[in-house]
Image (cartoon, helix red, strand yellow):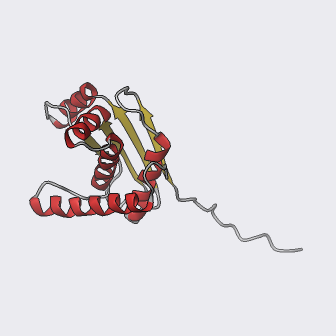
Amino acid sequence: MPSPPEHRPPAVAEAIDVEVSDTQSHLAVDPGRLARLAGDVLRGEGIDAASISIALVDDPTIHRINRDHLDHDWPTDVISFALSDPGDRRLVGELVISTEMARSTAAELAEDPSDELELYVVHGLLHLCGYDDTSDEAALRMGERQRAILEGRRASTPRGLVP
């Protein structure tokens, strides 16, 4: 009689899961594009297991969240909430992003609002990955990483095409 096969625990598939919730009406958004961007950023930071939620909201909503959770009584561009502990195998977090802020800031800078929105996604994800911008040195390091990610992405994507 053959011996029973050796018992092995089931393989755990590592994955990056990104969910985009869009409750705003200020900017037309391609949720799939933002999810792909998030996955690319995380993989670029060496993360292969993550569960990320991206909530696209208006200024009054992000203002309320900023006030209630961070004691800042103003609207902002992006807020990152780390929901996992440093060192956990799976990165879990949420980004809350104001598309209204992206649209108005882009208009002031004569930029594309979609590019501004992508900047907010990258910035928020880098915070979840451990980057900090509370000191000049840390902000410089984080800004350089943001630029490298966005420039690399734009260089590899012809204008007008969704990667």
User: Considering depth in this image, is 146 or 126 the residue closer to the camera?
Assistant: 146
Expressed as whole percent of the image width and height from the top left, the position of residue 28 reads 41, 33
Q: Is residue 128 left or right of residue 157?
A: left
User: Considering depth in this image, is 77 or 133 the residue closer to the camera?
Assistant: 77
> Which image quarter holds the N terminus?
bottom right
Number of marks in picture = 0
Q: Quick one: which residue is furthest to the bottom in this view?
A: 2
User: Considering depth in this image, is 34 or 163 the residue closer to the camera?
Assistant: 163
Q: Quadrant of residue 146?
A: bottom left
Q: Quick check: can you spot residue 89?
A: no
Q: Is residue 107 left or right of residue 17?
A: left
The residue drawn where x is 10% and y is 58% is 135
Q: In the displayed structure, would residue 26 be above or below residue 120? A: above
Expressed as whole percent of the image width and height from the top left, the position of residue 61 reads 28, 27
Q: In the displayed structure, would residue 41 be above or below residue 102? A: below
Q: Is residue 40 left or right of residue 80?
A: right
Q: Quick check: can you spot residue 13?
A: yes
